[in-house]
Amino acid sequence: MKIDHFKNKILFVFLVGALSQFASAQQNAGPPPPDPLPLGFFVTSVGLGDGADLGGLEGADAHCQALAEKVGAGDREWRAYLSAQATDSEPAVNAGDRIGDGPWGNAKGIEIAASLDSLLYDNSNINYEHALDENGEHINARSAGDSPNKHDILTGTQIDGTAFPPGEDMTCSNWTSNDAGKAQVGHSDRHRFTFPGSPWNTAHPSRGCSQEALLASGGDGLFYCFAAD
């Protein structure tokens, strides 16, 4: 009986120790990772092939919707992150006003930003690692040594998500020109040769509006798509 009691005591001590180690490991592991988000953001895998002539904002939105449908996300309302400048007959359209309130996840379920404020003013996850196309593929980028480089993403937008004032064309005639004008672009990989890097939504103007001009400055007529619902 004394031997059985001794064995039981040893077993009890072993179990208490094992549970203590398990609890400690759980504490050290930290909180569990967040659940993946549904697809709410992507960079277009392909442009429309006609430079910055996207058929206006409507044509760009339709392209986002079509690409989303191909990967099973067509039940959401998709908008291109593009601004349009004011004209004599139409007011300006701000890209930041078009895309909803978030949160937005990429094709891997990683949160890009929780809200519009975090997207525009905090360190959003739009960078080489997380700015993926609708298929979950990286965008060719200078920072990764890819060739050809395609990190110039059409936006026509200032850093706060608003359109440029009327006057100098920064949107290739509001996304209807493949010839005259230029377009403001952002860098999907945020690559720049100086610290801290380029903004994802406003880095520099393109060399022109044709497909050839966009390719020459490091782009391919790609743009950002967000789920606005």
Image (cartoon, rainbow, N blue to C red):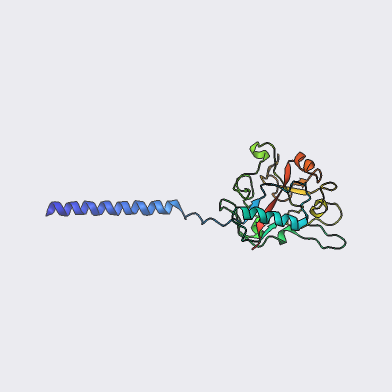
**Residue that appears at 79% across and 50% down:** 53
- Farthest residue toward the left? 1
Q: How many numbered dots are placed on residues in this image?
A: 0
**Residue that appears at 64% across and 38% down:** 144
Question: Considering the image in quadrants, where does the C terminus appear?
Answer: bottom right
Q: x and y percent of residue 41 in the render?
A: 63, 54
Q: Nearer the viewer, residue 3 or 45?
A: 45
Q: Nearer the viewer, residue 130 or 136?
A: 136
Query: Residue 143 occupies which quadrant of the picture?
Result: top right
> From where the camera sits, is residue 81 visible?
no
Q: Nearer the viewer, residue 207 or 49?
A: 49
Q: x and y percent of residue 95 in the render?
A: 73, 58
Image vertical order of residue 119 relative to residue 180, above or below: below
Q: x and y percent of residue 64 in the render?
A: 68, 54
Q: Nearer the viewer, residue 145 or 49?
A: 49
Image vertical order of residue 221 relative to residue 36, above or below: above
Question: Considering the image in quadrants, where does the N terminus appear?
Answer: bottom left
> From where the camera sits, is residue 44 visible?
yes
Image vertical order of residue 178 relative to residue 95, above or below: above
Q: x and y percent of residue 147 in the render?
A: 68, 36
User: Would you say 32 lies left or right of 221 here?
Assistant: left
User: Would you say 97 lies left or right of 144 here?
Assistant: right
**Residue that appears at 84% across and 48% down:** 181
Image vertical order of residue 207 relative to residue 27, above or below: above
